[in-house]
Image (tube, helix red, strand yellow):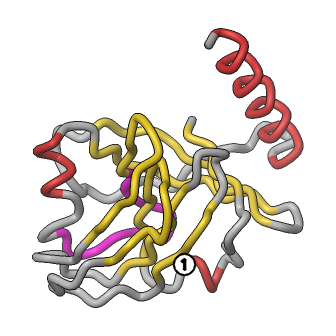
Amino acid sequence: MKARVSSRLAAWAITVALCFPDGAAVALEPAHLVAGFERGLALLETEGPRCLLIDTYFANTAKQRSQGLMFVETLEEFEGMYFGSESPVELNMWMKNTLVPLDMLFISEDGTVSHIARNTQPQSSDRIASRGAVVGVLELNAGFARRWRVAPGTRLWLL
């Protein structure tokens, strides 16, 4: 396990050095989303290479996962919420009481985007499936994936 963590940290350090050679890895000032959620950063490494730094809220507890982005009225361009799983599972999401349309990036065990549910319908109870076993999903503003050329295969780093 230690070797896996060390190799991940080394890969992350190399990625940050390549994407931010001058060390300018600063996130935009986040809007208030949900009190009590752990906050951190996620880095999407797209083709080009282009690195996108996302101010991320982590839904870690069962209560936080059931709440998600419900009732949030706005989400900044580089803000999102990550729902993780300990091991790969088939995920089903929904938009119940979620007021903003979202892009949902489903993350495979190797840390890459396996599927994107684009422009999800606000307040819908329809199930949004991961289409295979994944370790998490990153929710971002609808259209984010198109605007920033995020596609299956894009790598996600949780910082």
Residue 119 position, x and y percent, is: 42, 88
Q: What residue is shown at x 49% (from left), y 54% (from top)?
A: 134
- Disc 1 crowd, CA 10 A, few/some/many (<14, 14-19, 20+): some
Q: Residue at x 15, y 82 (%)?
A: 125
Q: Mark 1 points at which residue?
A: 144
Q: In which quadrant will I find the N terminus?
A: top right
Residue 65 appears left or right of 28: left
Residue 12 at x, y percent in the picture: 74, 33
Which quadrant would residue 84 be assigned to in this image?
Answer: top left
Please name the residue shown 20% across and 37% down the image.
Answer: 61
Displayed quadrant of residue 51: bottom right
Is residue 80 one of those drawn in magenta?
A: yes
Per the rendered image, the range of residues in magenta is 72-82
Q: Where is residue 117 in the image (x, y as percent from the top left)?
A: 46, 80
Secondary structure beneath dot 1 equals helix
Compared to residue 74, the image places residue 88 above or below, namely: above
Q: Which residue lies furthest to the top in this view?
A: 2
Q: What residue type is labelled 1?
A: Phe
Residue 91 locus on image (x, y percent): 35, 61
Say which quadrant the C terminus sits in.
top right
**In the displayed structure, would residue 22 be above or below residue 148?**
above
Residue sitting at x 62%, y 62%: 113
Magenta region, main secondary structure = loop
